[in-house]
Image (cartoon, coloured by chain):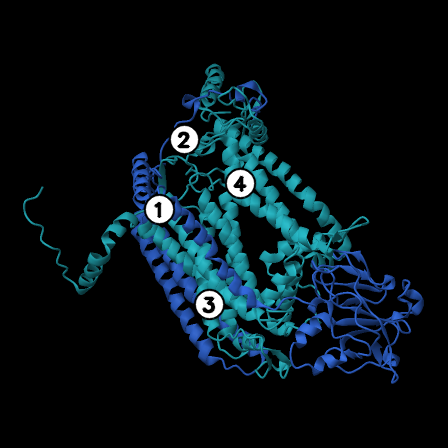
Amino acid sequence: MGNHSDDLPASSEVVAKAGHDEVEKFQDPGLPPHRLRLADTDPKAAKRAERQVAILFGISAIGTLLFFFAYFGIRLDQTIATLRLQNMFLGLGIGFAMLGIGTGIVHWARALMPDHEVSEERHEMRTEEDRLAAVQIVDDIVEETGIKRRPLIRNTLIGAMALAPLPAIAILRDLGPLPGNAMHTTLWKKGERLARDPDGTPIKAADVTIGSAFHVIPESLNTLTEGKLNEKAKAAVLMMRLDPDELHPSAGREDWAYNGIVAYSKICTHVGCPVALYEQQTHHLLCPCHQSTFDLTRECKVIFGPAVRPLPQLPITVDSEGYLVAQSGFHEPVGPSFWERS
Amino acid sequence: MSTTAQTPFEPKTSTGRITNFVDERVGGSGMLREFGRKVFPDHWSFMFGEVALYSFVILLLSGTFLTLFFDPSMAETHYNGSYVPLKGLEMSVAYDSTLNISFDVRGGLIMRQVHHWAALLFVAAVSVHMLRVFFTGAFRKPRELNWVVGGVLLILSMAEGFTGYSLPDDLLSGNGLRIIDGVIMAIPVVGTYISFFLFGGEFPGTAIISRLYMFHIMLIPAMILLMIAIHLFMVVVHKHTQYPGPGRNDRNVVGYPLGPVYAAKAGGFFFIVFGVIALVSAFFTINPIWNYGPYDPSPISAGTQPDWYIGWVDGALRLMPGWLFNIPLEWHIPFPWGVNTLTLNVLLPALVPAGIVFTLLFAYPWIERWVTRDDREHHVLDRPRNAPTRTAIGVAGFIFYCVMWAAASSDLIATHFEVSLNDVTYWLRALFFIGPILGFIISKRVSLALQRKDREIALHGRETGRIVRLPHGEYQEMHAQLDDYKRYKLVGYESPLAEEGIPNENGIVTKTEKRRAALSRFFFEDRVAPATQAELTAGHEHHEAIEAGEEAKPVSRY
């Protein structure tokens, strides 16, 4: 900038010293002189602006007509294309109707209404006189109630006021049942068949090829008449078949798989989204909500993301007809952690 | 005193008679006298609050239409409407009625689109408005309480948005509720109970949609309306702030009178906001619930995104590692009555970042007031560069928010830019800590640099690009001086100095006071002194001395 270097803050003349006063400050030159617009001086320009405003209002009227044309003129015929077309013209109609009025008014204000800036005094937020008067009033009120002289009234009132809201809390008790054992149980039990989600047909072990994955529900789910979603939210299972050599079951879980077929809870142990993405090559399960990643070959141990616990495994086997069944229920609660879970 | 009795006013036209009738009963003349010509300062950045207000009005209008057709029941039904792919499917009545609004109620789809877009814009406008207020220091005395009201409005608008987003009971919003339930479950001691009370039993139950509906169309909007009323009332009491400039100071307010110019501009602007939302709704689909299907706890689609304003909380959940090296962040704590579970991997990201952001947001006016010991009323705004530390704190907070916000799209970032999802998360985890610090340093330096530029221009004028050669061979660039008005805009601000601790009446500098002094240094140690009249005069004299020996030049040179 130019040829000056004497204005860097490092040089002494720039460092302001404490005690610098108003004398050194720039004087406020006051409001700048008002500049006239074209429309203020040239009647032709004013007339032109007037016409422009009128045209904008006219566009608004056309927009309203367009809305009616779209509303009554376009017949919905169960196709998405017609719906989109109507939606577009309805939106265009409303859009132009509104924009025409809006831009017209703003243009009118900017081009034709006086644009003199004016200055107004601000007032003190609170004057000392008001404060004194208010203090006096409060003192008088307190005095007239006699609350200071009659502590018995004051204390019983405080006690009553503290108790009175409690029913408002208690009355909310019936918002829902207590958790009880609900978090610890699912529909899965010994002998419950594994069925396809959503149609509920049972799955034969012979139909499960290596590398395939099944979204699974308990067979009895679809027979429920009530609370189906509640049960499904706990009982949804992912079932995959791997080469048995790739599974590394821990002690006590060796027979939880059948022929390389394993079943794990589909409900993420993080905050409960369905862990629905199965990567066949790496045998990883990924939760699309927060990207917790579970390694199927290591009993769904968490290898990435915010989850801590592995997905609970459902022990499975086959029944006499060759259908896959649960050996038992889950051995731990499924889904997100909660305080009472141990 | 006049001796003649005043004859009562007799209106001549019928309009006059009606107006007079009302005026005599409500005292409208007095109100009009008070407010009709009230002065409002004008600046483009003051529009964000207006956008927020107008989108809220549009939300009320479009929302009222939607309630006429929406049925918030979770009873099971089979779809029998116009949308062929979903025919015969089992779904809740809420989802069914949302499909009907979209496909069978004429204009229903455009109203849903308008409602959703207006909601997105509403929260965005509230947020940007708050950023404007923060960076210009408009929250300072006497407006601290209105800043708090604004913060409450931000929280309410997020709650209003989320409850509305959940109502259609589609797959996407259902999974959002699943996440909320998972977070509630993580609350120690009472989490499971809150979840069961909220959902009326186990998730998802059959109560949540109608309960959210009550919150969405009654409780929260009523609270927002009340807060808006308080907010605007305080704006009237305080009168609007104004940007610094010639003729503007803390004792006056400079701008256009309410009637006609300001009212026309602001009123016209409502229609513009409405028009823009309508056009966006005409061309860009938002929340096509028919693509997602009804809620079912088993399926899910990849690349799920919440509405933008919830993103930062969801992103925080994603950023949190479940395991820190080999330490699990879920603790099983043995109590005498048994083992209980503390789910830090959910609790920490759900509570801590939002806690930090909102605590600092609400407390900031008092923090700055304590550090500066400034108890004066401020009606003239700061240009952000003239309050470098505040600006830097704001930018740091903004980046903190944005890193979490970006994290909510970590999977989409990975797929769009073809990078590893894990790497995106690792980078964002690092940025979560480093980003705000870098943002602080850079924005503070940029602010100081801009202040220096202002100083240079105030004292030496603008570069003209004209190079002249002096008789003795030196080349110089001509600078054009600013006029007094433009210069005052650059120099008319306060630049506080860092303060030493002040001893109390016993002559002791207390620990608190030392802390205040340290913060004062942190705020004001680095500063560029505003240009002074003396410097300008000195510059002129120096310059004239050169000129005297070298003949007068037509353009002054600096």
Judge the density around disc 1: few (<14), some (14-19), many (≥20) Cα neighbours within 10 Å: some
Q: Nearer the viewer, mark 4 or mark 3?
A: 4
Does residue A205 appear in this view?
A: yes
- Numbered badge on residue B261: none
Classify mark 1: helix, strand or loop.
loop
The residue where tag 4 is placed is: B364
Check disc 3 and give the amino acid type. Answer: Ser
The outermost residue toward the left is B4
Classify mark 2: helix, strand or loop.
helix
Check disc 4 and give the amino acid type. Answer: Tyr
Q: Nearer the viewer, mark 2 or mark 1?
A: 2
Classify mark 3: helix, strand or loop.
helix
The residue sitting at 49% across, 35% down in the picture is: B369
The residue where tag 2 is placed is: B484
The residue sitting at 41% across, 23% down in the picture is: A22
Q: Colour of chain B?
A: cyan
Along the polypeptide, which appears first: circle 3 or circle 2?
A: 3
What x and y, as percent, mark residue B342? 71, 54
What x and y, as percent, mark residue A52? 37, 59
The outermost residue toward the front is A152
Determine whether, in the image, residue A322 is placed left or right of residue A22. Answer: right
Determine whether, in the image, residue B291 is placed left or right of residue A157. Answer: right
Front one among B519 and A133: A133
The residue where tag 3 is placed is: B62
